[in-house]
Image: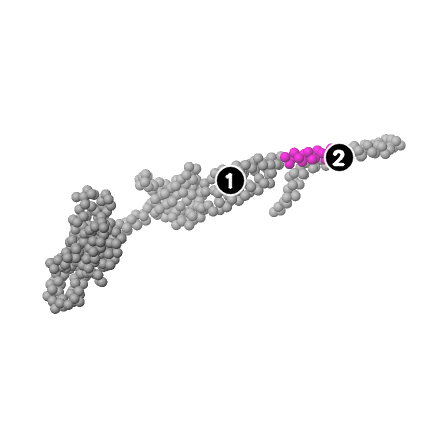
Amino acid sequence: MRVESSKERLWSRLIQPILWPVLLAQGVLVALCLVVGVLLWWMVPSHASWSATFWMMLALLVGSSANVLVFLTLLRQRLATCEAALDEQLAIGERYLAQPRLGRSVPIAAVEDTASEGDPVRRLSRLLDGVAALLDEQARAPQLERMLAASGRPALLATRDRVLVANAAMEELLGQGELRGLAVSQLLPVDESESDLEQCVVRPVGARRPSSRWLQLRLEDDRGHALVLLDDLEHRERRLDQLLVGRQRAREESRLKSGYLSHLRRELKPLMVSLGEVLDQEAAPVRRDAAGRRSVLELRERLADISVLLANLTDEPRAQGAGASASGPARVLIVDDGPVNLMLAQQVLEGQGYSVETATSGAQALECQARQAFDLVLMDIFMPDMDGVEASLRWREQEAGRVEGQRSILVALTANASDADRQRFREAGMDDYLAKPYRPQALIDLVQRWLPEAQEETGSP
Protein backbone atom coordinates (compact mmCIF):
# COMPACT_ATOMS: atom_id res chain seq x y z
CA MET A 1 0.00 0.00 0.00
CA ARG A 2 1.43 3.36 -1.13
CA VAL A 3 1.66 6.08 1.54
CA GLU A 4 1.24 9.72 0.52
CA SER A 5 4.06 12.14 1.19
CA SER A 6 3.55 15.47 2.95
CA LYS A 7 3.67 17.38 -0.39
CA GLU A 8 1.11 15.06 -1.97
CA ARG A 9 -1.22 15.44 1.01
CA LEU A 10 -0.86 19.28 0.83
CA TRP A 11 -1.64 19.26 -2.93
CA SER A 12 -4.61 16.87 -2.79
CA ARG A 13 -6.28 18.26 0.33
CA LEU A 14 -5.53 21.98 0.24
CA ILE A 15 -4.57 23.30 -3.23
CA GLN A 16 -6.23 20.98 -5.74
CA PRO A 17 -9.86 21.64 -4.64
CA ILE A 18 -9.50 25.39 -5.35
CA LEU A 19 -6.88 25.33 -8.14
CA TRP A 20 -8.99 23.72 -10.87
CA PRO A 21 -11.81 26.31 -10.75
CA VAL A 22 -9.22 29.13 -10.98
CA LEU A 23 -7.45 27.47 -13.92
CA LEU A 24 -10.78 26.93 -15.65
CA ALA A 25 -11.69 30.59 -15.21
CA GLN A 26 -8.26 31.60 -16.54
CA GLY A 27 -8.71 29.36 -19.57
CA VAL A 28 -12.12 30.85 -20.30
CA LEU A 29 -10.65 34.35 -20.04
CA VAL A 30 -7.82 33.54 -22.47
CA ALA A 31 -10.25 31.92 -24.88
CA LEU A 32 -12.57 34.92 -24.68
CA CYS A 33 -9.68 37.31 -25.44
CA LEU A 34 -8.65 35.20 -28.43
CA VAL A 35 -12.19 35.11 -29.77
CA VAL A 36 -12.53 38.88 -29.42
CA GLY A 37 -9.17 39.42 -31.18
CA VAL A 38 -10.07 37.10 -34.05
CA LEU A 39 -13.45 38.77 -34.52
CA LEU A 40 -11.89 42.24 -34.62
CA TRP A 41 -9.25 41.12 -37.09
CA TRP A 42 -11.81 39.34 -39.27
CA MET A 43 -14.44 42.09 -39.23
CA VAL A 44 -12.20 45.15 -39.67
CA PRO A 45 -8.75 43.90 -40.58
CA SER A 46 -7.77 47.22 -42.10
CA HIS A 47 -8.40 49.09 -38.87
CA ALA A 48 -6.61 46.53 -36.56
CA SER A 49 -3.79 48.23 -34.77
CA TRP A 50 -1.41 47.84 -31.90
CA SER A 51 -3.80 49.85 -29.76
CA ALA A 52 -6.46 47.14 -29.89
CA THR A 53 -3.87 44.47 -29.15
CA PHE A 54 -2.63 46.47 -26.16
CA TRP A 55 -6.07 46.77 -24.65
CA MET A 56 -6.74 43.07 -25.15
CA MET A 57 -3.50 42.12 -23.41
CA LEU A 58 -4.31 44.54 -20.59
CA ALA A 59 -7.75 42.98 -20.14
CA LEU A 60 -6.16 39.54 -20.12
CA LEU A 61 -3.64 40.64 -17.46
CA VAL A 62 -6.33 42.20 -15.27
CA GLY A 63 -8.47 39.09 -15.54
CA SER A 64 -5.53 36.84 -14.70
CA SER A 65 -4.67 39.01 -11.68
CA ALA A 66 -8.27 38.79 -10.51
CA ASN A 67 -8.12 34.99 -10.83
CA VAL A 68 -4.90 34.86 -8.78
CA LEU A 69 -6.47 37.10 -6.13
CA VAL A 70 -9.51 34.83 -5.95
CA PHE A 71 -7.20 31.80 -5.64
CA LEU A 72 -5.26 33.33 -2.78
CA THR A 73 -8.46 34.35 -1.00
CA LEU A 74 -9.87 30.84 -1.27
CA LEU A 75 -6.52 29.39 -0.11
CA ARG A 76 -6.51 31.68 2.92
CA GLN A 77 -10.06 30.70 3.81
CA ARG A 78 -9.22 27.02 3.46
CA LEU A 79 -6.10 27.44 5.66
CA ALA A 80 -8.18 29.22 8.29
CA THR A 81 -10.71 26.34 8.23
CA CYS A 82 -7.91 23.76 8.66
CA GLU A 83 -6.34 25.79 11.47
CA ALA A 84 -9.69 26.05 13.26
CA ALA A 85 -10.17 22.31 12.93
CA LEU A 86 -6.63 21.72 14.22
CA ASP A 87 -7.22 24.08 17.18
CA GLU A 88 -10.39 22.20 18.04
CA GLN A 89 -8.60 18.85 17.98
CA LEU A 90 -5.73 20.23 20.05
CA ALA A 91 -8.18 21.62 22.62
CA ILE A 92 -9.88 18.22 22.84
CA GLY A 93 -6.53 16.51 23.41
CA GLU A 94 -5.48 19.07 26.01
CA ARG A 95 -8.71 18.67 27.95
CA TYR A 96 -8.33 14.89 27.83
CA LEU A 97 -4.80 14.97 29.20
CA ALA A 98 -5.76 17.50 31.88
CA GLN A 99 -8.41 15.18 33.32
CA PRO A 100 -7.25 13.51 36.62
CA ARG A 101 -6.74 9.78 36.34
CA LEU A 102 -5.89 7.11 38.92
CA GLY A 103 -2.23 6.11 38.77
CA ARG A 104 -1.41 8.69 36.04
CA SER A 105 1.68 10.89 36.13
CA VAL A 106 1.26 13.03 32.97
CA PRO A 107 3.02 16.40 33.39
CA ILE A 108 0.01 18.75 33.64
CA ALA A 109 2.23 21.82 33.26
CA ALA A 110 2.94 20.70 29.70
CA VAL A 111 -0.70 20.99 28.60
CA GLU A 112 -2.24 23.70 30.77
CA ASP A 113 -2.79 27.29 29.63
CA THR A 114 -1.96 26.44 26.00
CA ALA A 115 -5.26 27.67 24.55
CA SER A 116 -4.06 31.26 24.91
CA GLU A 117 -0.95 30.61 22.84
CA GLY A 118 -1.34 31.15 19.11
CA ASP A 119 1.48 28.84 17.99
CA PRO A 120 -0.08 25.48 17.00
CA VAL A 121 3.36 23.90 16.64
CA ARG A 122 4.21 24.48 20.31
CA ARG A 123 0.77 23.33 21.40
CA LEU A 124 1.10 20.20 19.29
CA SER A 125 4.59 19.55 20.68
CA ARG A 126 3.38 19.81 24.27
CA LEU A 127 0.38 17.69 23.48
CA LEU A 128 2.58 14.95 22.04
CA ASP A 129 4.81 15.08 25.14
CA GLY A 130 1.75 14.54 27.33
CA VAL A 131 0.57 11.66 25.14
CA ALA A 132 4.01 10.05 25.33
CA ALA A 133 4.01 10.33 29.13
CA LEU A 134 0.51 8.85 29.26
CA LEU A 135 1.50 5.93 27.04
CA ASP A 136 4.58 5.32 29.17
CA GLU A 137 2.46 5.27 32.33
CA GLN A 138 -0.02 2.93 30.67
CA ALA A 139 2.82 0.58 29.69
CA ARG A 140 3.86 0.36 33.37
CA ALA A 141 0.29 -0.28 34.57
CA PRO A 142 -0.64 -3.81 35.77
CA GLN A 143 -1.68 -6.10 32.96
CA LEU A 144 -4.76 -7.88 34.28
CA GLU A 145 -5.01 -10.24 31.34
CA ARG A 146 -1.44 -11.47 31.85
CA MET A 147 -2.08 -11.85 35.56
CA LEU A 148 -5.18 -13.93 34.84
CA ALA A 149 -3.27 -16.09 32.37
CA ALA A 150 -0.56 -16.74 34.98
CA SER A 151 -3.10 -17.74 37.66
CA GLY A 152 -3.77 -21.43 38.20
CA ARG A 153 -7.22 -20.75 39.64
CA PRO A 154 -10.20 -20.33 37.28
CA ALA A 155 -10.73 -16.60 36.76
CA LEU A 156 -12.33 -14.17 34.32
CA LEU A 157 -12.96 -10.47 33.70
CA ALA A 158 -16.49 -9.35 32.88
CA THR A 159 -18.44 -6.17 32.17
CA ARG A 160 -22.18 -5.95 32.68
CA ASP A 161 -22.33 -9.72 33.21
CA ARG A 162 -20.55 -10.43 29.92
CA VAL A 163 -17.19 -12.19 29.73
CA LEU A 164 -14.34 -10.02 28.47
CA VAL A 165 -11.45 -12.43 28.97
CA ALA A 166 -11.01 -15.77 30.78
CA ASN A 167 -7.85 -17.68 31.64
CA ALA A 168 -7.04 -21.21 30.53
CA ALA A 169 -8.12 -22.73 33.86
CA MET A 170 -11.63 -21.26 33.48
CA GLU A 171 -11.90 -22.44 29.87
CA GLU A 172 -10.78 -25.92 30.91
CA LEU A 173 -13.27 -25.99 33.78
CA LEU A 174 -16.21 -25.00 31.56
CA GLY A 175 -15.04 -27.12 28.62
CA GLN A 176 -15.15 -24.22 26.14
CA GLY A 177 -12.35 -22.59 24.23
CA GLU A 178 -13.98 -19.19 23.68
CA LEU A 179 -16.02 -17.53 26.44
CA ARG A 180 -15.93 -13.90 25.30
CA GLY A 181 -19.39 -12.33 25.21
CA LEU A 182 -21.15 -15.10 27.14
CA ALA A 183 -23.23 -14.32 30.22
CA VAL A 184 -21.44 -15.00 33.50
CA SER A 185 -24.68 -15.75 35.37
CA GLN A 186 -25.47 -18.53 32.89
CA LEU A 187 -21.97 -20.03 32.92
CA LEU A 188 -21.69 -19.87 36.74
CA PRO A 189 -25.21 -20.26 38.20
CA VAL A 190 -25.43 -19.66 41.94
CA ASP A 191 -26.48 -22.55 44.19
CA GLU A 192 -29.00 -20.79 46.45
CA SER A 193 -29.21 -23.75 48.83
CA GLU A 194 -25.54 -23.42 49.86
CA SER A 195 -24.96 -19.67 49.41
CA ASP A 196 -25.36 -17.09 52.13
CA LEU A 197 -24.16 -13.58 52.96
CA GLU A 198 -20.61 -14.77 53.69
CA GLN A 199 -20.02 -17.05 50.71
CA CYS A 200 -21.38 -17.62 47.20
CA VAL A 201 -21.34 -21.20 45.90
CA VAL A 202 -21.68 -21.79 42.14
CA ARG A 203 -22.01 -24.93 40.04
CA PRO A 204 -20.25 -24.30 36.67
CA VAL A 205 -22.18 -25.33 33.57
CA GLY A 206 -20.31 -27.94 31.53
CA ALA A 207 -17.88 -28.91 34.28
CA ARG A 208 -16.31 -32.35 34.16
CA ARG A 209 -17.92 -33.22 37.47
CA PRO A 210 -21.61 -32.31 37.39
CA SER A 211 -21.68 -32.17 41.19
CA SER A 212 -18.64 -29.89 41.50
CA ARG A 213 -19.09 -26.94 43.84
CA TRP A 214 -16.94 -23.82 43.64
CA LEU A 215 -16.63 -20.85 45.95
CA GLN A 216 -16.95 -17.61 43.96
CA LEU A 217 -15.07 -14.44 44.87
CA ARG A 218 -16.40 -11.46 42.93
CA LEU A 219 -14.87 -7.97 42.95
CA GLU A 220 -16.86 -5.21 41.17
CA ASP A 221 -16.57 -1.48 40.55
CA ASP A 222 -19.18 1.20 39.89
CA ARG A 223 -18.83 0.86 36.09
CA GLY A 224 -20.05 -2.70 35.88
CA HIS A 225 -16.60 -4.32 35.59
CA ALA A 226 -16.05 -7.46 37.66
CA LEU A 227 -13.20 -9.83 38.51
CA VAL A 228 -14.44 -13.36 39.22
CA LEU A 229 -12.22 -15.96 40.94
CA LEU A 230 -13.22 -19.55 41.73
CA ASP A 231 -11.92 -21.83 44.46
CA ASP A 232 -12.72 -25.55 44.58
CA LEU A 233 -14.91 -25.91 47.65
CA GLU A 234 -14.45 -29.66 47.89
CA HIS A 235 -10.68 -29.30 47.71
CA ARG A 236 -10.83 -26.63 50.43
CA GLU A 237 -12.95 -28.90 52.63
CA ARG A 238 -10.49 -31.76 52.14
CA ARG A 239 -7.61 -29.48 53.16
CA LEU A 240 -9.57 -28.35 56.21
CA ASP A 241 -10.22 -31.95 57.18
CA GLN A 242 -6.53 -32.71 56.82
CA LEU A 243 -5.66 -29.75 59.03
CA LEU A 244 -8.17 -30.85 61.66
CA VAL A 245 -6.79 -34.39 61.59
CA GLY A 246 -3.25 -33.04 61.89
CA ARG A 247 -4.23 -30.84 64.82
CA GLN A 248 -5.91 -33.76 66.56
CA ARG A 249 -2.85 -35.91 65.96
CA ALA A 250 -0.59 -33.18 67.34
CA ARG A 251 -2.79 -32.89 70.44
CA GLU A 252 -2.65 -36.63 70.96
CA GLU A 253 1.11 -36.67 70.55
CA SER A 254 1.42 -33.75 72.98
CA ARG A 255 -0.77 -35.56 75.49
CA LEU A 256 1.33 -38.72 75.15
CA LYS A 257 4.59 -36.78 75.53
CA SER A 258 3.22 -34.98 78.57
CA GLY A 259 2.33 -38.36 80.05
CA TYR A 260 5.80 -39.66 79.31
CA LEU A 261 7.38 -36.63 81.02
CA SER A 262 5.13 -37.00 84.06
CA HIS A 263 6.00 -40.69 84.28
CA LEU A 264 9.70 -39.87 83.92
CA ARG A 265 9.43 -37.30 86.67
CA ARG A 266 7.74 -39.76 89.03
CA GLU A 267 10.42 -42.34 88.30
CA LEU A 268 13.24 -39.81 88.74
CA LYS A 269 12.15 -38.66 92.20
CA PRO A 270 12.78 -41.97 94.08
CA LEU A 271 15.91 -42.45 91.98
CA MET A 272 17.32 -39.16 93.25
CA VAL A 273 16.47 -40.08 96.84
CA SER A 274 18.19 -43.43 96.48
CA LEU A 275 21.17 -41.86 94.72
CA GLY A 276 21.49 -39.27 97.47
CA GLU A 277 21.55 -41.98 100.13
CA VAL A 278 24.19 -43.90 98.19
CA LEU A 279 26.30 -40.76 97.82
CA ASP A 280 26.02 -40.06 101.54
CA GLN A 281 27.10 -43.62 102.40
CA GLU A 282 29.70 -44.32 99.73
CA ALA A 283 31.29 -40.88 99.36
CA ALA A 284 32.22 -40.25 103.00
CA PRO A 285 35.95 -40.90 102.39
CA VAL A 286 35.85 -38.85 99.22
CA ARG A 287 34.18 -35.86 100.85
CA ARG A 288 37.09 -35.40 103.22
CA ASP A 289 38.94 -33.44 100.53
CA ALA A 290 37.61 -30.37 98.70
CA ALA A 291 37.77 -31.92 95.22
CA GLY A 292 35.70 -34.94 96.23
CA ARG A 293 33.12 -32.80 97.97
CA ARG A 294 32.89 -30.57 94.94
CA SER A 295 32.31 -33.57 92.63
CA VAL A 296 29.47 -34.84 94.83
CA LEU A 297 27.86 -31.41 94.94
CA GLU A 298 28.16 -31.02 91.20
CA LEU A 299 26.43 -34.37 90.61
CA ARG A 300 23.57 -33.41 92.89
CA GLU A 301 23.20 -30.00 91.23
CA ARG A 302 23.02 -31.52 87.78
CA LEU A 303 20.37 -34.02 88.88
CA ALA A 304 18.42 -31.18 90.48
CA ASP A 305 18.62 -29.21 87.22
CA ILE A 306 17.09 -32.15 85.34
CA SER A 307 14.27 -32.31 87.86
CA VAL A 308 13.61 -28.56 87.51
CA LEU A 309 13.45 -28.96 83.74
CA LEU A 310 10.90 -31.77 84.00
CA ALA A 311 8.87 -29.77 86.53
CA ASN A 312 8.66 -26.80 84.18
CA LEU A 313 7.67 -29.02 81.25
CA THR A 314 4.85 -30.74 83.11
CA ASP A 315 3.45 -27.94 85.31
CA GLU A 316 1.54 -24.80 84.27
CA PRO A 317 1.87 -21.54 86.24
CA ARG A 318 -1.17 -19.60 87.39
CA ALA A 319 -2.65 -16.52 85.71
CA GLN A 320 -0.35 -13.76 84.56
CA GLY A 321 0.02 -10.24 85.82
CA ALA A 322 0.62 -10.75 89.55
CA GLY A 323 3.94 -8.91 89.69
CA ALA A 324 3.13 -5.62 87.93
CA SER A 325 2.82 -2.60 90.16
CA ALA A 326 1.74 0.99 89.73
CA SER A 327 5.33 2.19 89.95
CA GLY A 328 6.58 -0.43 87.53
CA PRO A 329 7.21 -4.17 87.72
CA ALA A 330 9.41 -5.60 90.48
CA ARG A 331 12.98 -6.26 89.33
CA VAL A 332 14.24 -9.83 89.68
CA LEU A 333 17.72 -11.16 88.83
CA ILE A 334 18.21 -14.89 88.13
CA VAL A 335 21.78 -16.16 88.43
CA ASP A 336 22.29 -19.70 87.09
CA ASP A 337 24.88 -21.29 84.83
CA GLY A 338 22.33 -23.78 83.44
CA PRO A 339 20.84 -22.19 80.28
CA VAL A 340 17.70 -24.35 80.22
CA ASN A 341 16.78 -23.73 83.87
CA LEU A 342 17.65 -20.04 83.45
CA MET A 343 15.29 -19.72 80.48
CA LEU A 344 12.43 -21.61 82.14
CA ALA A 345 12.62 -19.61 85.39
CA GLN A 346 12.71 -16.38 83.37
CA GLN A 347 9.61 -17.37 81.39
CA VAL A 348 7.70 -18.28 84.56
CA LEU A 349 8.44 -14.97 86.31
CA GLU A 350 7.94 -12.80 83.22
CA GLY A 351 4.59 -14.49 82.79
CA GLN A 352 3.70 -13.14 86.23
CA GLY A 353 4.58 -9.58 85.20
CA TYR A 354 8.02 -9.22 86.83
CA SER A 355 10.94 -7.45 85.15
CA VAL A 356 13.54 -10.22 84.88
CA GLU A 357 17.25 -10.11 84.04
CA THR A 358 19.61 -13.07 83.91
CA ALA A 359 23.26 -13.79 84.65
CA THR A 360 25.27 -16.98 84.13
CA SER A 361 28.00 -16.41 86.73
CA GLY A 362 28.67 -14.63 90.01
CA ALA A 363 30.91 -12.06 88.33
CA GLN A 364 28.21 -11.23 85.80
CA ALA A 365 25.66 -10.87 88.62
CA LEU A 366 27.89 -8.30 90.35
CA GLU A 367 28.14 -6.38 87.06
CA CYS A 368 24.34 -6.29 86.88
CA GLN A 369 24.22 -4.97 90.46
CA ALA A 370 26.56 -2.13 89.49
CA ARG A 371 24.17 -1.04 86.71
CA GLN A 372 20.90 -1.08 88.67
CA ALA A 373 19.26 -2.24 91.88
CA PHE A 374 17.16 -5.41 92.14
CA ASP A 375 14.32 -6.24 94.49
CA LEU A 376 15.04 -9.97 94.56
CA VAL A 377 17.95 -12.17 93.44
CA LEU A 378 17.71 -15.91 92.81
CA MET A 379 21.30 -17.16 93.27
CA ASP A 380 22.38 -20.63 92.18
CA ILE A 381 24.88 -22.03 94.70
CA PHE A 382 26.98 -24.32 92.55
CA MET A 383 28.69 -22.29 89.79
CA PRO A 384 32.25 -22.42 88.40
CA ASP A 385 34.88 -19.83 89.35
CA MET A 386 32.70 -17.99 91.86
CA ASP A 387 29.95 -19.98 93.60
CA GLY A 388 26.71 -18.51 94.92
CA VAL A 389 27.98 -18.12 98.51
CA GLU A 390 30.98 -16.02 97.50
CA ALA A 391 28.87 -13.99 95.06
CA SER A 392 26.35 -13.27 97.85
CA LEU A 393 29.14 -12.08 100.21
CA ARG A 394 30.44 -9.64 97.58
CA TRP A 395 26.88 -8.57 96.75
CA ARG A 396 26.31 -7.56 100.39
CA GLU A 397 29.67 -5.76 100.48
CA GLN A 398 28.73 -3.65 97.46
CA GLU A 399 25.33 -2.89 98.97
CA ALA A 400 26.96 -1.68 102.18
CA GLY A 401 29.07 0.78 100.21
CA ARG A 402 26.07 2.48 98.60
CA VAL A 403 24.66 5.70 100.02
CA GLU A 404 20.99 4.88 99.46
CA GLY A 405 21.35 1.61 101.31
CA GLN A 406 18.76 -0.39 99.30
CA ARG A 407 18.91 -4.05 100.26
CA SER A 408 18.05 -6.84 97.84
CA ILE A 409 16.44 -10.13 98.88
CA LEU A 410 18.89 -12.99 98.18
CA VAL A 411 17.45 -16.50 97.72
CA ALA A 412 19.66 -19.54 97.29
CA LEU A 413 18.86 -22.16 94.63
CA THR A 414 20.46 -25.42 95.72
CA ALA A 415 20.06 -29.17 95.80
CA ASN A 416 21.71 -29.31 99.24
CA ALA A 417 19.40 -27.98 101.94
CA SER A 418 20.96 -29.45 105.09
CA ASP A 419 21.17 -27.51 108.36
CA ALA A 420 24.85 -26.80 107.76
CA ASP A 421 24.15 -25.51 104.28
CA ARG A 422 21.35 -23.25 105.50
CA GLN A 423 23.64 -21.85 108.20
CA ARG A 424 26.28 -21.16 105.54
CA PHE A 425 23.72 -19.34 103.41
CA ARG A 426 22.66 -17.13 106.32
CA GLU A 427 26.27 -16.24 107.09
CA ALA A 428 26.71 -15.18 103.46
CA GLY A 429 23.79 -12.75 103.79
CA MET A 430 21.12 -14.83 102.08
CA ASP A 431 17.51 -14.42 103.24
CA ASP A 432 15.95 -17.68 102.04
CA TYR A 433 16.54 -20.77 99.92
CA LEU A 434 14.61 -22.83 97.37
CA ALA A 435 15.55 -26.48 97.18
CA LYS A 436 15.98 -28.13 93.81
CA PRO A 437 14.05 -29.62 92.20
CA TYR A 438 11.29 -27.06 92.61
CA ARG A 439 7.94 -26.74 90.89
CA PRO A 440 7.13 -23.56 88.93
CA GLN A 441 4.37 -22.74 91.39
CA ALA A 442 6.83 -23.02 94.28
CA LEU A 443 9.03 -20.42 92.57
CA ILE A 444 6.05 -18.09 92.09
CA ASP A 445 4.94 -18.50 95.72
CA LEU A 446 8.44 -17.71 97.01
CA VAL A 447 8.75 -14.51 94.95
CA GLN A 448 5.27 -13.34 95.93
CA ARG A 449 6.01 -14.05 99.62
CA TRP A 450 9.06 -11.78 99.56
CA LEU A 451 7.48 -9.15 97.28
CA PRO A 452 3.92 -8.84 98.60
CA GLU A 453 3.61 -5.16 97.66
CA ALA A 454 3.82 -5.95 93.95
CA GLN A 455 0.98 -8.46 94.32
CA GLU A 456 -1.28 -6.17 96.39
CA GLU A 457 -0.97 -3.16 94.06
CA THR A 458 -2.35 -5.16 91.16
CA GLY A 459 -5.35 -6.33 93.16
CA SER A 460 -4.43 -9.98 92.75
CA PRO A 461 -5.81 -12.44 95.33
Q: Is residue 346 left or right of residue 235?
A: left
- Mark 2 belongs to which amino acid? Ser
Q: Residue 194's image quarter? A: top left
Residue 27 picture location, percent across and down: 75, 36
Of residue 127 and residue 363, the one placed in the foreground of this image is 363
Task: Tell me if mark 1 has few (under 14), some (14-19) or many (20+) residues whose alpha carbon lies within 10 angstroms of its own.
Answer: some
Of residue 54 and residue 314, the one placed in the foreground of this image is 314
Residue range in magenta is 63-80
Residue at left offset 64%, top offset 44%: 6
Q: Secondary structure at mark 1?
A: helix
Q: Is residue 322 left or right of residue 117?
A: left
Residue at left offset 21%, top offset 57%: 394
Most common SS among magenta residues = helix
Residue at left offset 26%, top offset 50%: 244
Residue 312 picture location, percent across and down: 20, 54
Which sits earlier in the primary sequence, circle 2 or circle 1? 2
Q: Which mark is residue 441?
A: none
Confirm whether the magenta stretch covers residue 73: yes
Q: Residue furthest bottom?
A: 285
Task: Tell me if mark 2 has few (under 14), some (14-19) or many (20+) residues whose alpha carbon lies within 10 angstroms of its own.
Answer: some
Q: Which mark is residue 108?
A: 1
Residue at left offset 18%, top offset 59%: 389
Q: Which residue is mark 2?
A: 64
